[in-house]
Amino acid sequence: MRNRRLLALVAAGLVAAGTAVAAPAGASHAWGNYHWARTSNPFTLKVGDNVSSTWDGHLDTAVSDWSASSVLDLAKVAGGANPRNCRGTAGRVEVCNSTYGNNGWLGIAQIRASGSHITQGVVKLNDTYFNTSRYNTAAWRNLVMCQELGHTFGLHHQDEAFDNPNLGTCMDYTDDPSSNQHPNAHDFSMLETIYAHLDSSTTLGASAPNARGAGGAGGEAEWGRAIRYSADGRPSLFEQDLGGGQRVFTFVIWAR
């Protein structure tokens, strides 16, 4: 599995052949202790394809990129959501695109959790902005698709300042996505840390109950309270407390 991860990084041009893969010392970008419950590694997480043909290649790239992890395999399956509201499905991630409006966001990831266990995820890509000349590029589409999927596994951003030098990962905020279109070695190391332990039960498949939360076109009014801000002062993570240990987290990447 580790060899598979290294080969994928080399193929993607993220490291040169023969170069050691090292993570930044002391850095951590998990968001709390949230993770999918599973009884073995690597585990398979289904990703529902609710995207248009314009997005299909970018979804395929992200699925392939993240499946290079030693602990995680993604399996693209037929979508189970209406892209206009993109309601979540228990035990999997739904990925949708639509013209969600001039609401300021390029993409969001919404993750429902029961206690510390992720039970469903949703990724929404806002074509209102991706249909404009600034964002209608392969690089921007790859970055946002990759980043929002990464959140649904338990990853946070590695950096939240748009004008810092690129870190070579899609989990990095940037104004120039050219070298931030794929995961990097530190993302994979972080996933290994998050999923180092095993659980006695699983939230994969249809094991978790469907309920309100994660869905809808989305806006700050329905995301709950902001609990984290990026370097430019905008909220990047929201929490909605549903009671009974149930929460929905919304990660936002804003248009600039």
Image: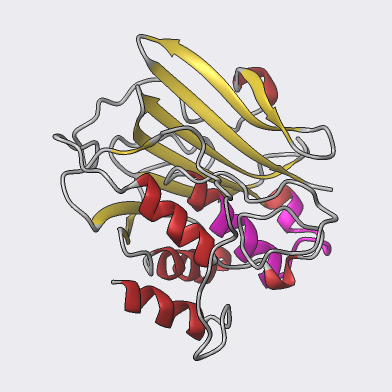
Q: Which residue reaches farthest front?
A: 25
Indicate left or right for 187 with 94 as reference.
right
Indicate left or right for 63 with 24 as reference.
left
* Image x and y of residue 253, in percent: 69, 44
Indicate left or right for 35 with 177 as reference.
left
Is 225 or 102 nearer to us in this picture?
225
* Colouring style: secondary structure
133 in magenta: yes
Residue range corresponding to the magenta coloring: 129-147
Is 120 or 216 nearer to us in this picture?
120
233 in magenta: no
* Image x and y of residue 134, in percent: 83, 62
The answer to whether residue 96 is visible is no
The residue that appears at 54% across and 63% down in the rendered structure is 23
The residue that appears at 56% across and 87% down in the rendered structure is 16
Image vertical order of residue 104 relative to residue 238, above or below = below
User: Looking at the rendering, which quadrant does residue 218 occupy?
Assistant: top right
The residue that appears at 15% across and 34% down in the rendered structure is 201
